[in-house]
Amino acid sequence: MEIKKFLILIIILNITNFVFADTINPTKNLTAYDVIKIQLNALKNNNKPKINSGIMQTWMFAHPENKKITGPYDRFQKMLLGDQYKFLLNHESHKIKLIMNSKNKYIYNVELISSDKKMYFYEWHLEISTTKSCNNCWFTTNVSPPINKGKII
């Protein structure tokens, strides 16, 4: 019976490692720009290597305080699949422009071309975390609703 429990534990650990194998975890070595690039590239390739892996990667860099508001991952995933943020998923391209920065906060303007060839602007806020799990790590604290700039030529 003990061997059976041990084998089940090994299988669960291997599955967990497989699911998060391509996920980049927050670390204090990443800059605010690194974090927004990681998130946008993950969302651009949302279904690679597996369905909604881009959303999972983005969740990893959601600020711990925001996770209390957005709820567990399933609720966060529904939010990104919803009308406000669906344009981020599998988008064609993005440009990131710094708007404002201070020691503990960066704000970027993201110009995004969606998969249906429309241009959207998002404002992306990142802040330093002081949590025990990742002290001095950059996390996203806010992403504005999109501003639709219409079809591109």
Image: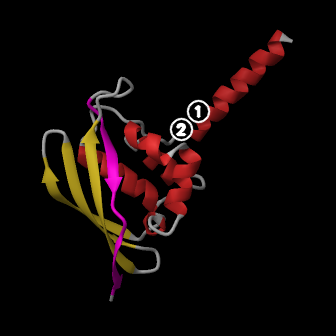
- Look at label 2 and name its amino acid: Ala
Residue ID at (52%, 65%)? 82
User: Secondary structure under badge 2?
Assistant: loop
Against 136, residue 90 (above or below) is below
Q: How many marks?
A: 2
According to the picture, the residue beneath numbered tag 2 turns out to be: 21
Q: Is residue 131 visible?
A: yes
User: Secondary structure under badge 1?
Assistant: helix
Against 7, residue 106 (above or below) is below
Query: Magenta part mainly helix, strand or loop?
Result: strand
Residue ID at (55%, 45%)? 73
List x then y, in percent, for residue 22. Answer: 50, 42
**Circle 2 residues within 10 Å: few <14, some 14–19, many ≥20:** few
Q: Is residue 71 left or right of residue 63?
A: right
According to the picture, the residue beneath numbered tag 1 turns out to be: 17
Q: Which residues are magenta?
A: 136-152
Residue ID at (60%, 40%)? 19
Which corner quadrant of the image does residue 123 belong to?
A: bottom left
